[in-house]
Amino acid sequence: MDDFLAARSQMALSLGFHIIYACIGMVMPFFMAIAHYKWFRTNNIVYRNITRAWSKGVAIFFATGAVSGTVLSFELGLLWPGFMKHAGPIFGMPFSLEGTAFFIEAIALGFFLYGWDKLNKWFHWFTGIVVGVSGLASGILVVSANAWMNSPAGFDYVNGEYINIDPIQAMFNDAWFSQALHMTLAAFAATGFAVAGVHALMILRKKNEVFHTKAFRIAIVFGAIAALLQPVSGDISAKDVTQRQPAKLAAMEALYKTEKAAPLIIGGIPDEETQTVNYKIELPGMLSFLAHGDFTHEVTGLDRIPKENHPPVAITHFAFQIMVGIGSFLVLLALLYFISLKKRSWYDRKWFLKLFVMAIPLGFIAVEAGWVVTEVGRQPWIIYNVMRTADAVTPMPGIAYSFYMFTAIYLSLTAVVIFLLRRQIQMVPVLYDRNDSTNPPAH
Amino acid sequence: MEYVVIAYLFLSILLYVVLGGADFGAGIIELFTSARNKNRTRDTLYRAIGPIWEANHMWLIITIVILFVAYPLIYAEMSVYLHIPLLVMLFGIIARGTAFVFRHYDAVKDDMQHLYNRIYFASSFITPLFLGIIAGSVISGHIDHAATSFADVYIFSWLNWFSIGVGLFVVALCGFLASVYLIGETDNPEDRRRFINKARHMNIAAVASGVYVFITAWIDGIPLVNWIFGTTIGLIAVIAASISLVVLWILIYSGNAIIIRMLAGFQVTMILLALGYAHFPDFIVITNGTNLTLMDHRATMQTINALGWALLIGTIFIIPALFYLYYKFKHKEYPHE
């Protein structure tokens, strides 16, 4: 593996790992806050137990997310010193604010996890909310830094010099809003469906059904609402990318030739040699409509973009298909859930629960695919149209070995986290719900 | 504003060494505790640092953000020449943070605990060791822009007896901070005695490694003696640290836990002050003498101003919350979690 590819792989691995933990760490506190609030309102001990059970998950995810985030702040320099040397002062503003947000999140989490029976109950509840809000703020700030790489702003690039730096303008670049919105909704959808799915699995297995049913209902509401809103945000993003990064849009859609009334390509295998897409389904005019709001508008294809500035088409296209496919499936599942509110009997049906079990990993696969679209689709640039990724990489040889080590570490961490969560779930009957497994399911 | 940023840079390094260092030290102490007392030590330790350790480690993030936003050249320089020790330190940070949380949040307490413990001990030792090695390498002047071979550029930039000495010194310092800190966390006289003993051992280790650092600095031609004793501020700082150390050992048996903690923290502050004052504004020393300094290698003023305001505003939110956190969890009763 050559060093450049190794550095890109290590960055992708680290981000791909961190993003899952970060999503869960910023979304689950809101689930906890609802369960916590329901406990205050209903005095039903089950809600308290759900809150406590979830808080252990959050502790595990937060710790892993925090260390992997620390690693990333170093990796930016370890792998891309050429980039950080120039970009640090320009796009550093969201990172300096994120430092505060992250700090507050850690403090609030300390209060929340260790504050049971020690703090005023509403203050304790409030610290849980602070964990969520500051986590969300951190996420949005980091995405805004990434958006700057897609949509550089707040400086002038003259003769290889970066001058007239304005960190605030850099932070509020053109892409920050659409990216942050899409990512935030994705985090809620992915985490909502994953958590709900795990509880659906336990209901299917007839374990602690009261506990798991209540937990399922809280998580799924967040997931379902986010999934239903996501297509709107996706549309905003698509129109935005069309304007700012035509090469990325063309790669997403594997559009090799500039066309009027461009079709939307579903599936298919792009062939770099012949510049065609095999085995595809075409919806005539749809791409023009989605990108420009007009069925006959011209959409820029890869033929208008110099060959050396093409992103990898196949990867971007596949990732985009996966993201949209899963997103659509989750929209259907969300609708199904809202219908089930009328048709109560569905709750006992195995097919209904099994669909949600199936969705456990899907949201996160879509999140990863979405990041592949935005990151791989930006290549060969690290700062779009300003600096090439290849010019930013560290001069140090042997990065492949550090990539292998990180792969080993992150794989084992993932294994341990799954192992710990399984154990936490298995212990639900002992820790929270001693008698419940013999009770009839409550509706 | 640039002095605000510099002040925050030194403050965050100091707080990371004192607070984060005490967390690492807790692992080091547990490592050197006899099997018989391990469980009790672990218990005290968990109550003491469980709620606050995440917050303590945020100072490292603040440090690194200040470096890459305000001093990108320094950050890039360290990232390239000290890639390997930074990597080892990162592995240590990952391992320590996760092992500490995993061992507590594993719902079933079985043989896995041994694995978590082993990882936790090893990483509690390795992380501050490499933190010290990095600090030592930054000032020892082995970073050589003219070097061409892999070993000269990426290994001998940090692998030397002086840097290793600084690493060991930091490890001993962490152990010392943690022992002093833990004395106040227990009411059991026997435990107190054990922690006082640990503090003594760690103090001796710190002095021994400190002497070793001076000797290697002298052999290596690093003007460490001049830096520390050559300036009035440095001299005053060293004297203040020595006096406070004596006071600490007088008060350690009977004194107020808060006061002895303050004294230990004060000593570290004085050591860093002495070193930082003499070294300022240089940050990274390079073989050919063209050092990277905090004054000449900073980002543009627009960036410095924005960062300075972000830090000042952040402080308004962080400091009260942080103090309340420390205050709230300073009681010795067993938490329910």
Image (cartoon, coloured by chain):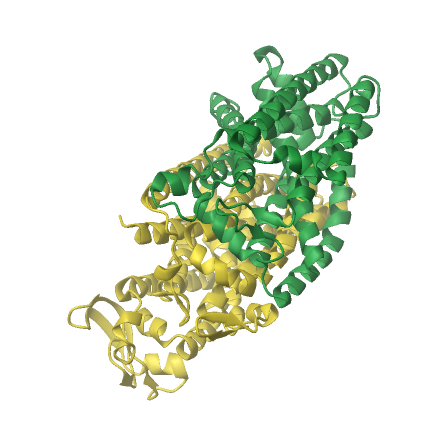
x, y (%) of residue B266?
A: 76, 34
In-image side of B31 versus A286 (left or right):
right
- From the viewer's perspective, is residue A98 above or below residue A150? above
Which residue is situated farthest in the left direction here?
Answer: A274
Q: Residue at x 82, y 29 (%)?
A: B259
Chain A image colour:
yellow
Chain B image colour:
green
x, y (%) of residue A33?
A: 65, 50
Residue A118 in view here: no
In-image side of B279 versus A325 (left or right):
right
Viewer-closest of B230 and B254: B230
x, y (%) of residue B34?
A: 59, 12
x, y (%) of residue A401?
A: 33, 41
Q: Quadrant of residue A255?
A: bottom left
Viewer-closest of A273 and A403: A403
Q: Residue at x 75, y 34 (%)?
A: B235
